[in-house]
């Protein structure tokens, strides 16, 4: 019996069904199968039999792809009724077999047994295809390294990478995706499916249901890049699979940044080059406009220097999906490793800039305003005038001012700093001198729009009186000093008048800030009660 089995197995291997060698022969083979299952396997003698039998209870045909087994895995598979095919190569070769199998099957399912041990879940994966979906993916979170890595999520305090266990696809969809593509990987297959707007059903077993919300939202990522030829490839490689579009804005780079992006090969990438450098803010605005045109629900920003950890991206996106915020941003100032190694002058500059931005924007709870790792909702993008956003490094401060004027909710997301080979070039002394006038103009604009045009609040009067009284007290002080130098007599009440004007000015400003804080606090409380 063993000899007969060996002869049977050898005949199967010597003629590794026309799937591998000749697609034309496969397409001429009647009858056409409704459902084919492919199981790549290596040294799984103890478990392959049960997997084949269970798959055969659903499928018309089961193919076991031999990855170089040295035990009796293939013999047991053949005994279970599977066709055995030698497979040389990695994922690309595997997907070629999948494509060729689709030429004579209505539905094809690829099973990765090392990532999905529970074969009973098979029916949950292919059933959506009968309900009109083009592709159905069943995945499982695991910590081990695996080629089928697709997306990343945050589960409590632990970061998991999600691995494909099942991939089910209709013949028509697979052939349309792979048509004309010489090199096909699982990542490019799923990306192409999203690009062509195919209906993809995601099933994640034993994963927080909130993560599935990432798949239901259209998510774009803007990548501003200026002379980032060294790091742009790493940045793009790290962007998770659940992102639908990647908008790379080349801000008139003079190196190979654009060439690298064009050759990257990710169908999600939309490349735009500025012929004249417009600044990082101008680049991000261009990306925002493209995202609005594509009707993205949420748009994140990840700079091309690879300092923004993609593992943290869900933490920025979830508050927007769940209706808790319209704009989220990273905050590194509560992280010890961010402050370590920072000079006292730089720390002071950062804290001073945070304080000025609090006053200018009205978001008194926001810290680390220069953190460019952000996410914003489509609603927030549609309500602000993107063409009026400050085009240089102060864009994030200006954006906060505009968001507050229209009542958008902003949330800080505490995260550690991620230092790479690229270092920040911001000199806080010079930067604050340059940005401060913009913040003051934005502050006045916010008071006018938020508290006089869209609504009215007496705090504008307190701010106005304070901004009059303080300069007046300074002028009184200089005048008194000048008279003393000229030895001219001053009224006895003059010093008291100066201190009175100064104290009144400070008090008016403090009252204005206090009322501004209360307005923001009450609005947040109303949002919380409404939820």
Image: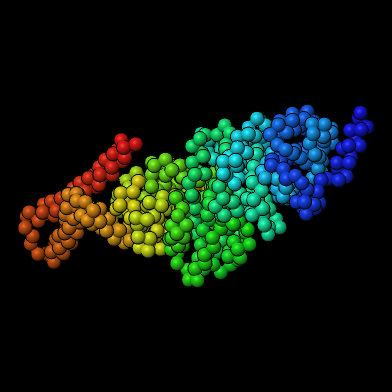
Q: Judge whether residue 206 can be spotted in this image.
A: yes
Residue depicted at x 64% and y 42%: 168
Q: Name the foreground residue: 340 vs 259.
A: 259
Q: Is residue 35 above or below residue 391?
A: above
Q: Is residue 470 left or right of residue 150?
A: left
- The answer to whether 487 is drawn above or below residue 332 in the figure is below
Q: Residue at horizontal 25%, vertical 42%?
A: 518
Q: Nearer the viewer, residue 274 or 417?
A: 274
Left or right side of 466 for 93 = right
- Looking at this rendering, what residue extends furthest in the front direction? 31
User: Image point 27% across, 55% down: which residue?
Assistant: 446
Looking at the rendering, in which quadrant would you find the N terminus? top right
Residue 209 versus residue 328: which sits nearer the camera?
209
Q: How many marks?
A: 0
Measured as percent of width and height from the top left, residue 325 is found at 38, 44
Query: Of residues 119 and 343, which is closer to you in this image?
Result: 119
Q: Which residue is at the far bottom?
A: 275
Spot occupied by residue 530 in the image (x, y as percentages of width and height) = 31, 37
Q: Position of residue 344 (x, y in %)?
A: 43, 49
Q: Give the colour scheme of this rendering.
A: rainbow
- Residue 305 x %, y %: 54, 56
Q: Which quadrant would the C terminus be assigned to in this image?
A: top left
Q: Can residue 368 be seen by looking at this rendering? A: no
């Amino acid at each position: 019996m063993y000899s007969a089995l060996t002869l049977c197995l050898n005949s199967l291997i010597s003629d590794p069904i026309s799937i591998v060698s000749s697609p034309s022969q496969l397409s001429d083979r009647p009858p056409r199968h409704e459902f084919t299952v492919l199981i790549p396997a290596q040294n799984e003698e103890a478990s392959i039999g049960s997997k084949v039998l269970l798959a055969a209870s659903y499928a018309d045909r089961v193919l076991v792809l031999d990855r170089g087994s040295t035990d009796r895995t293939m013999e047991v598979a053949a005994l279970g009724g599977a066709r055995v095919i030698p497979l040389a190569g990695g994922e690309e070769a595997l997907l070629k077999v999948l494509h060729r199998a689709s030429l004579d099957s209505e539905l094809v399912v690829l099973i990765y047994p090392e990532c999905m041990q529970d074969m009973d879940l098979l029916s949950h994966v292919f059933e959506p295809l009968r309900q009109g979906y083009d592709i159905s993916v069943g995945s499982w979170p695991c910590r081990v390294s695996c080629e089928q890595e697709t997306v990343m999520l945050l589960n409590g305090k632990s970061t998991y990478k999600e691995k494909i266990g099942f991939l089910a696809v209709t013949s028509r969809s697979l052939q349309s995706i792979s048509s004309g593509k010489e090199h096909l990987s699982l990542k490019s297959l799923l990306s192409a499916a999203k690009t062509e707007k195919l209906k993809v059903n995601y099933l994640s077993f034993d994963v927080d249901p909130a993560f599935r919300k990432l798949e239901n939202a259209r998510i774009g990522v803007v990548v501003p890049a200026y002379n980032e030829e060294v790091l742009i490839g790493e940045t793009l490689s790290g962007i998770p699979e659940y992102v639908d579009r990647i908008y790379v804005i080349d801000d008139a780079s003079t190196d190979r940044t654009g060439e690298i992006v064009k050759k990257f090969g990710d169908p999600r990438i939309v490349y735009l080059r500025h012929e004249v450098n417009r600044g990082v803010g101008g680049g991000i605005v261009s990306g925002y406009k493209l995202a609005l045109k594509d009707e993205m629900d949420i748009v994140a920003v990840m700079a091309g220097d690879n300092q923004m950890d993609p593992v943290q991206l869900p933490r920025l996106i979830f508050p927007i999906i769940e209706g808790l915020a319209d704009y989220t941003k990273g905050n590194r100032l509560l992280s010890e490793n961010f402050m370590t190694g920072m000079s006292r002058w730089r720390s002071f500059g950062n804290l001073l800039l945070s304080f000025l931005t609090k006053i200018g924007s009205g978001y008194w709870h926001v810290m680390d305003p220069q953190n460019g790792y952000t996410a914003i909702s489509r609603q927030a993008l549609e309500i602000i005038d993107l063409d009026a956003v400050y085009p240089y490094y102060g864009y994030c401060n200006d954006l906060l001012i505009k968001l507050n004027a229209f009542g958008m909710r902003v949330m800080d997301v505490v995260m550690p700093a991620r230092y790479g080979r690229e270092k920040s070039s911001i000199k806080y002394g010079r930067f604050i001198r340059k940005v401060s006038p913009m913040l003051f103009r934005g502050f006045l604009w916010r008071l006018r729009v938020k508290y006089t045009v869209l609504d009215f609040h007496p705090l504008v009067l307190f701010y106005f009186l304070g901004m009059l009284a303080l300069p007046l007290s300074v002028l009184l002080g200089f005048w008194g000093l000048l008279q003393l130098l000229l030895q001219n007599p001053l009224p006895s009440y003059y010093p008291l008048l100066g201190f009175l004007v100064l104290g009144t000015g400070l008090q008016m400003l403090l009252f204005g800030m206090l009322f501004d804080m209360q307005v923001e606090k009450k609005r947040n409380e109303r949002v919380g009660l409404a939820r």
